[in-house]
Image: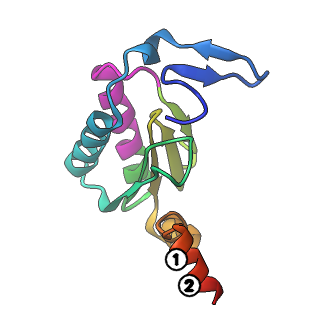
């Protein structure tokens, strides 16, 4: 996956630890399929999957989706975390659940962002991460 081997986590104090929950994680494609299926089942809107290979070392993919309201965003996030746990992918890190404007779910190889539509429009994560960063494109932009 990048700087860290699969199943290892960097603790706040800088130490590496092996998580038993993550030691047997499935490949990113299986997790991504489960995430996309869960988002579809919960009627998430405007679901976008972004391949992060070659762009960053912290994840292989990012998924961005919208919920219709704070309650819908919270329900989507809660169901997704429960589905990942039930499928054996361990505990996910979750941020933003109390307010449900923007919930971030770190599922290891896949990062999921669930937004209310107006918050998603403000941050435009898809635009930031979808930019092609190949050297040829960088040279063309600089010219």
Q: Is residue 6 above or below residue 19?
A: below
Q: Secondary structure at mark 1?
A: helix
Q: 3 or 91, which is in the foreground?
A: 3
* Mark 1 neighbour density, 10 Å: few (under 14) some (14–19) many (20 or more): few
Q: Which mark is residue 37?
A: none
Q: Quarter-wise, where is residue 48 in the image?
A: bottom left
Q: 48 or 4, which is in the foreground?
A: 4
Q: Is residue 134 above or below residue 84?
A: below
Q: Position of residue 18 (x, y in %)?
A: 56, 12
Residue located 20% across and 46% down the image: 41
Residue located 24% across and 54% down the image: 43
Q: Position of residue 140 (x, y in %)?
A: 56, 84
Q: Quarter-wise, where is residue 3 in the image?
A: top right
Q: 12 or 86, which is in the foreground?
A: 12
The CA distance from mark 2 to mark 1 is 5 Å
Residue located 77% across and 23% down the image: 14
Can residue 80 be found in the magenta stretch?
yes
Q: Which mark is residue 137?
A: 1
Q: Identify the coloring.
A: rainbow
Q: What residue is shown with label 2?
A: 140
Residue reaching furthest top?
Answer: 20
Q: Position of residue 97 (x, y in %)?
A: 53, 42
Q: Secondary structure at mark 2?
A: helix
* Direction from residue 85 to residue 107 in the image, left or right: right
Question: Do the residues bearing badges 2 and 1 touch, measured as CB atoms within 8 Å?
Answer: yes
Q: Quadrant of the C terminus?
A: bottom right
Residue reaching furthest bottom?
Answer: 143
Q: 23 or 139, which is in the foreground?
A: 139
Point out the stretch of residues depicted in magenta. 75-91
Residue located 48% across and 69% down the image: 132
Can residue 2 be found in the magenta stretch?
no
Q: Main secondary structure of the magenta part?
A: helix
């Amino acid at each position: 996956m990048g700087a860290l081997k699969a199943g290892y986590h960097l603790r706040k104090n800088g130490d590496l630890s092996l998580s038993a929950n993550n030691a047997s994680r499935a490949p990113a494609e299986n997790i991504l399929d489960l995430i996309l299926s869960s988002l579809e089942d919960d009627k998430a809107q405007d679901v976008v999957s972004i391949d992060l290979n070659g762009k960053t070392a912290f994840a292989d993919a990012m998924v961005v989706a919208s919920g219709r309201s704070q309650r819908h965003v919270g329900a989507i996030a809660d169901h997704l975390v429960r589905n990942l746990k039930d499928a054996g992918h361990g505990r996910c890190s979750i941020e933003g659940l109390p307010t449900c404007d923007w919930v971030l779910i770190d599922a290891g190889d896949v990062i999921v962002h669930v937004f209310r539509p107006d918050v998603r429009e403000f941050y435009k994560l898809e635009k930031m991460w979808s930019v092609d960063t190949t050297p040829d494109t960088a040279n063309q932009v600089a010219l």
